[in-house]
Amino acid sequence: MKRFLYELEESWKIAAAQMRSNMTRSTLTALGVIIGIVAVTLMGTAISGISIGFDNSMSVLGDDVLYVTQWPWKPVDDWWNYRDRKKIETDYAEKINRIIASTPNSNLIVAVPTSSLMRSVKSGGNEVDGVFTLGTTSDFTVTSTIDCKEGRFFNEIESREGAQVVVVGYDVADALFPSASAIDKTVLINGQNFKVIGVNARQGTFLGLFSWDSMVAIPLTAFNKYFSSKSASDARLGAASTESDVRVKVKDKKKLAEAKDELTGIMRRVRGLSPEKKDDFSINEQQAFKSTLDPVKNTIAIAGLFITGLSLFVGAIGIMNITFVSVKERTKEIGTRKALGARRRTILLQFLIESTALCLLGGFIGLAFAYLLCFGIGKAFPSFPIQFSFGLVIASMFVSVLTGLVSGFAPAWTASRLDPVTALRYE
Amino acid sequence: MFCDANLSLVDNSSLTTRPPGAVVIDIENITKEYVMGEEVVRALRGVTLQIRRNEYLAVMGPSGSGKSTLMNMLGCLDTPSSGRYEFNGRNVKEMDDDELAAIRNREIGFVFQTFNLLPRANALRNVELPLIYAGMDPDTRGQRAEQALIDVGLGDRIHHKPNELSGGQRQRVAIARALVNNPSIILADEPTGNLDSKTGDEIMALLEDLYLRGNTIILVTHERDIAAHARRTIHLRDGVIEADQVGFGGTDISSMDHRLEPDATMTT
């Protein structure tokens, strides 16, 4: 072991001297690895960025909330079985809450109804189209983490009375009131006036997944009063009709399965289903959604890493090539070293270290570039979640070393196997 | 012309020959065959030779005589096809690559015609090389290498790179490198082949000095006046030893006296 470290140190010195004396060549060769590492590292940050953006979007759903919906949150083959199910009504929430209240040790806390529509929102000369307009109750804050930058969410009284108040998402507020605070301003939603009482903090959007930034929320009572009756005309205009569901907060997210069973029972009571009948509703949780989208995410990750990995592979071929050249033009030197007592292992190690050192150098420079690029991208596109992690640094260094070892092995092996007599005679 | 230059260095006092010691190299009936294309080349056809400690031996022969092949055998760079080869009592023929490397490292000091210094390493680093391969710690290594360079008269050139040294100085570095591990033999292959005659004489004087200080030297050459420095000469022809003589073959030793002042060789 000690002997090995000794040889390692000596080989390292030789490699460093070799790189210094062939500066141009080393730089050009390292460039291949630099590009490879930049590509792989950027792809790595993009993938972890996608993952984080995804989780951010998912967190809107909450990991301790169950969703009662007509359709399940997964692709279904037998869609006709779901199409004719009864719609979920918002007043189920009240019934569910009553049952929860009368159940001792219930795993559920509260049910919140939501209805949604796409609406345009106006204020003065500004207009935002296709805003996800949500009607709900004040209990919504229990099921979703709503972070108000300014103002507040509507309270129980406003909720019950159907006050014409609205909480707007960051992007909506920004579009309607670019230079001033949106609070206490009036916006027009479908021709109705609503007073802005809260603006959400920026959440960040990603890949068009759920984000609070482009939503507005109004009391459900008001929603039903002004919008629901117009669903027929909406259908004619091609807009989606009202979608309603009930979300139920769970006490302990570790007991999600029990909670789900309990909620299923409650829903069957609400719907008045006889025991032999199948459920005519779906209960979903964030996890189900994740398990549908995770394969997509993983496919993107694998394909991305594979393609960028190709550029690193090209870099590795460059290293292999240059190490072969190096072995060839130093054949006589290898002969001399062997005559002086260098063993096969010593020669092998020398060239392996040379190629690894080149790759590691390329890796360091590539990483520095990637860091700067990430920084630049982060500045230029703030909405793109980019993540430059310590783990990524370690991983790319590891990949660099591995590339050096793999690409250097064939030439180094050739060198170590050279016959000293032939090598010494080589001109 | 060549001869004159050589002889001008020689004084008339008698050549000092050290008494030979134990057998270092014991070769019996070795052969070496190569396959070149479809032809089998028999480079050595049964060579028997013993070399003792404190000998100064010249191996002569025209090209194609098997001289280089024999040198590769003696230097443990290659193993014979058949026959027996013992180096300090150890059977070389059975050794694998790494064992041969160890023998070369500890027992043999190579001096090449083309010097074979590492161009990017300074003199000290070049001389350190065999010690590195022997696994010596850096401090001892540096001291040993420096001393070897002082011994060959290059104490003031330690940190020079080969391209900053003259041909003679380069060969001195190579000799220092050959000496630094205290090998059993020094194997010099045409050591003056790339040098002008004056520098060549200086190198020969240095080898003479090393011999007188107790080193065993094997000189491979095709030049008669270089071989004349040795105390024993073998002539190879067609892969066999044609003649094995004390002194230089065909020349009266008394007229070829070569004793040089060791101090004088250091200052040239």
Image: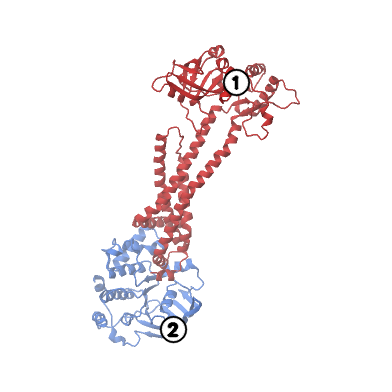
Chain colours: A red, B blue
Q: Residue at x 46, y 55 (%)?
A: A317
Along the line of sight, which residue is nearer the eye, A158 or A337? A158
Q: Are marks 1 and 2 in contact (CB under 8 Å)?
A: no
| Quadrant of residue B181 within the rendered picture | bottom left
Numbered marks: total: 2
Quadrant for the C terminus of chain A in the image: bottom left
Asked if labels 1 and 2 share a chain, the reply is: no
Judge whether B201 appears above or below A144 on screen.
Answer: below
Judge whether A188 appears above or below B215 on screen.
Answer: above
| Quadrant of residue A319 within the rendered picture | bottom left
In front: label 1 or label 2: 1
Q: Look at mark 2 in the image and give the residue it sits on.
A: B238
Disc 1 residue type (three-letter): Ala
Which chain letter matches label 1?
A: A
Disc 2 residue type (three-letter): Asp
User: In the image, residue A247 lies at what x, y percent?
Assistant: 60, 23
Which chain letter matches label 2?
A: B
Q: Residue at x 65, y 29 (%)?
A: A257
Q: Look at mark 1 in the image and give the residue it sits on.
A: A232
User: In the image, residue A388 lies at what x, y percent?
Assistant: 44, 38
Is residue A142 found left or right of B239 in the rendered image? right
| Quadrant of residue A106 within the rendered picture | top right
User: In the image, residue A119 lies at what x, y percent?
Assistant: 52, 22
